Every structure is written in structure tokens, then in C-alpha cells.
Amino acid sequence: MGKLTVRSVLSFIKEASEQIQTKKSGKLRLADGNGLYIVVPKKGEPYWMMRYTIAGKRSEMTIGKHSLLSLADAR
């Protein structure tokens, strides 16, 4: 079970959306645990991403947009 709550995700999205406009970085992300992240890009909608490693190679996979996929479903 991850460490994020629905309230903490919504709070992060709001704060990250404000912060990202002043940063040079293209996106901010917050980890839930077990490779699940909520990502807030500079342009576009927040989305869920999964990071995983196969044969020593780290990869990332987009799961879905935050507006269409709940935290429970992303897990």
C-alpha cells in the first residue's frame, strides 16, 4: 500500500502547478511507493507514471491521466 492519500495528491497537484511556472524543469513528480508516481508537467494534465526495472534497465510507463484514473485504480 502506498503512502499517498487523495488529499495529498490534490494538494501536490495544486502546489506543483504553481511552482512549475517558476522552475526551469519541465515536470515535478511525487512518489507513492512501489514505482508509482503522480507527475505534473509544465504543459498538459497531471498523469500517473510507473517506473520499473527489467534486466537492470530502468523504464517508465504512463498509466493514465489523473482526471480519468483514481489513486486506487492507479495502484
Image (cartoon, rainbow, N blue to C red):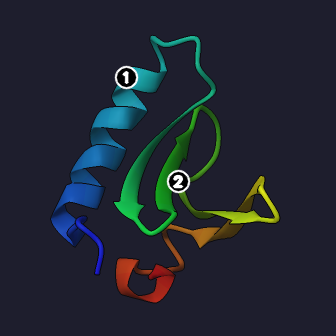
Quarter of the image for residue 7 reads: bottom left
Q: Name the residue under label 2.
A: 46
Residue lying at the far bottom of the rendered structure: 73
Residue 43, x across and y down, in percent: 64, 36
Q: Mark 1 points at which residue?
A: 19
The mark that comes first in sequence, 1 or 2, is 1
Task: Check if mark 1's residue and mark 2's residue have beta carbons within 8 Å.
Answer: no
Judge whether 58 appears above or below 63 on screen. above
Disc 1 marks a residue whose amino acid type is: Gln
Query: Considering only vertical position in the picture, is 11 above or below 23?
Result: below
Vertical comparison of 6 with 58: above or below: below
Residue in the image at 38% along x and 77% along y: 71
Q: Quadrant of residue 72?
A: bottom left
Residue beneath the point at 40% across and 54% down: 31
Q: Where is residue 34 in the image (x, y as percent from the top left)?
A: 45, 69
Q: What residue type is labelled 2?
A: Pro
Quarter of the figure that contains the C terminus: bottom left
Q: Where is residue 47 in the image (x, y as percent from the top left)?
A: 56, 60
